[in-house]
Amino acid sequence: MLSILFTTYALVFGAELVGDKTFYTIGTLATRHRLWPIFCGSTVAFMVKMLAAVLLGRVIAELPAILVAGLSAATFFTLALVIWFKKPEGEKRDMAQSGSWLKITLAAFASIFFSEWGDVGQIAAATLSARYGAPQVVWCGAVLAMVTKGLLAVTIGVTLRNRVPKNALRYATFGLCLAMGTLAIFRIDL
């Protein structure tokens, strides 16, 4: 069982880390908000998405590509609009005042949960679950891999938040969300 756990972790982490939009989404959230709610929201989203992967097996891979692309694009474009219309903030910012804990948690959850269904990490988890017949172990390994990726993205986001002016981050985040939405529409992976 331990070998299945490590195999799942390594495969999902590797698959998810290479050019994955979720990585950029979490890092972007970390440039603007407190970390604990981002971590909690994204972790719950990872848990639910990987549960769906191991329970549904290969069905996720069969979802219509247009549905996956449309949902991902809508999520990224919505984030871009929220960022664009949100009032710019000054350079000094108290993270305790960056939004309610629940609001940030829900934003992190939604940005992860409603994008990239049927991606490589989920397909890997679904395949490993079907192959080994150990959905609980595969789920644990997959969730651990996703949480590791999330922590890495948050770390990068915090580093940027501490070194780059807030308005520059705001415009860069807006542009990144537009780019990710456009890539999702045309089903282009990074």
Image: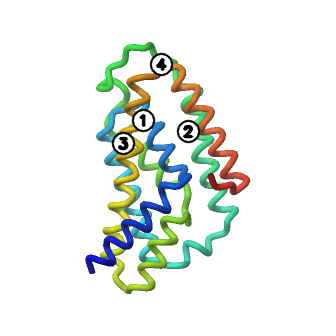
Give the distance between the C-alpha atoms of the residues marked 3 and 4, in whole angstroms: 21 Å
Question: Where residue 95 sits: x, y (%)?
Answer: 32, 25
> Which residue carries the number 3 mark?
38
Q: Sequence order check: which comes first, mark 1 or mark 2? A: 2
Q: Sequence order check: which comes first, mark 2 or mark 4? A: 2
- Between 10 and 54, the one lying in front of the other is 10
SS class of the residue under badge 3?
helix
SS class of the residue under badge 1?
helix
Give the distance between the C-alpha atoms of the residues marked 1 and 3, in whole angstroms: 11 Å
> Which residue carries the number 4 mark?
165
The single residue placed furthest to the right in the displayed view is: 186
Q: Amino acid at mark 1?
A: Gly
Question: Where residue 24 sits: x, y (%)?
Answer: 51, 43
Of marks 3 and 4, the one in the foreground: 4
> Which residue carries the number 2 mark?
79
Question: Where residue 75 sits: x, y (%)?
Answer: 57, 47
